[in-house]
Amino acid sequence: MASVDLQNINFYNVNGVQQKKAPDKTVSIPAETAPKPAFKADAYTSAVTIRTSLTTKDEKKKYEELSNELDLKYRKKLEFALKSGLLLKNNSNDRSSVLDNLHKIITEERDPGLDKINILQECLDILANPYVITQTCEDIPAQYKRQVIGLMTNLSENPKEIAEAKWELENMHTGTCPAASIEFDLATKHTAEFFRMVEGLTSPKNEVVKTIKMDSLSDKSSEAIWLLTKFKTPHQMNDFNTATVLLKPDEHAIIRARIQNHHKDPGERSIIDVLMQSTLMQLGSQQTYNSLNDKRAPNAWTQEDGGLIDFEKTYVESVVEDKNTTSVTYQIVDENGRLKGYEKDFGTIKKELLDTLKMGHNIIIGYTWPDPENDNKLAGHEITIVGYKTNSNGEGVFICQDSDDDIAAPIEMSEKFLLPKIHHAGLPDEIASRDFKYEDSWKVGLDEFQNMKKSV
């Protein structure tokens, strides 16, 4: 993905995180203070009862055992997680709390190539500042390159294939922005479920089982079943209303995760980022994602081999967050990949976004810009809108998370800059269907693909 226009973006400063130098003023925070979130707790957590003290013997025991595994820096982060109300949240699929799942990480067996303390520290880093979540690809150390290239080329001895794989490996820039955006949304809005998934993905099985409501995918059970089958999501129907799904990263993700366990550089993806993003890419790409080369197979909806397109992202979001999300397309793009117009006026788009924020949701959007290296056809990137404010000049500003900016803090984009660039947004169904009933985007995409095949 190309870099965003830094002249139109302001940055916040968050303690304890390496950042690129930003052009705007920042506020420094003493290093000795406990890390603080970019917003107050209720600005990026669900509106549920917040508990900030340990009340049962079990909770106190688990907290003490976690604390005993940590140094002073991470004990402060654990204390912050408790006092902010995050640690005892239990908005997970099985009602287990963040504390329960962190305790499992240190007391139950982990994947043999992963260290439980590293994982625990990464969890606490995310609890202290979820903006550390990134899609920035990790480099492969020299001692592992030969083996990784062998896996990428299926042990080919063809010099050209080997050279191409080596170049690809050394120049990789992940297309996992939709997955990273969903990862961030899970961590901030479904915190206990996020860490339940982390516990499962870092276990020896590298998997997590989840029960979902069928109407999170479609109003009709038959269409929901079709979607689960079409996306090749391992599942078992419990009844007409619910299904149990199996979520796993691709088989090569654990290689990158194990490398990061020992060789993570500042600003690179964490163990958690690697496994979570692979799992979400697998789910959206019909189980065809390969973490080694960051590619997926084309399918009935797209001929691309890179990231997820809008309704693949929406499918993933609907499954892992178990909520009915509709991908609303705002831009009209012609057959040559150039912007032709808009489906709605900017005032309506703004209202839909602000009403979604008022409901307590983040909004994952795809925004576009003309790519001068590709005949000015539109290129795109996914980010997450987390808030809105009016600045000192009376201008509206969206507060966003961008997993590809190497800045572990929220950023600001003026509405004047952002609104014309929004191609699509994931909105609650009740907002998406205000003006007219949206047809599910997967149907539209499939119909277009089938019509295209007929015309060939």
Image: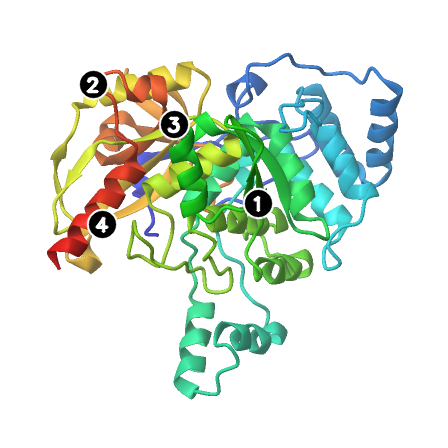
- The tag earlier along the polypeptide, 3 or 1, is 3
- Answer left or right for 33 relative to 181: right
Mark 1: secondary structure: strand
Q: Residues within 10 Å of mark 1 (few under 14, many from 20)?
A: many
Q: Which amino acid type corresponds to the residue marked 2 in the rendered image?
A: Gly
Residue 129 at x, y = what percent?
A: 59, 33
- The tag earlier along the polypeptide, 2 or 1, is 1
Residue denoted by label 1 = 247
Mark 2: secondary structure: helix
Residue drawn at (43%, 87%) of the image: 159
- The tag earlier along the polypeptide, 2 or 3, is 3
Image depth: mark 3 or mark 4 in front: 3
Give me the C-alpha separation between circle 2 and circle 1. 39 Å
Q: Residues within 10 Å of mark 3 (few under 14, many from 20)?
A: few
Give me the C-alpha separation between circle 2 and circle 4. 32 Å
Residue denoted by label 3 = 220
Nearer to us in this view, 6 or 91? 91
Residue denoted by label 4 = 449
Residue drawn at (56%, 72%) of the image: 148
- The tag earlier along the polypeptide, 2 or 4, is 2
Q: Residues within 10 Å of mark 4 (few under 14, many from 20)?
A: some
Q: Which corner quadrant of the image does residue 264 belong to?
A: bottom right
Q: Is residue 228 visible?
A: yes
Q: Look at the image and tell me in which quarter the C terminus lies.
A: bottom left
Check if mark 2's residue and mark 4's residue have beta carbons within 8 Å. no
Q: Is residue 251 above or below residue 74?
A: below
Residue denoted by label 2 = 347
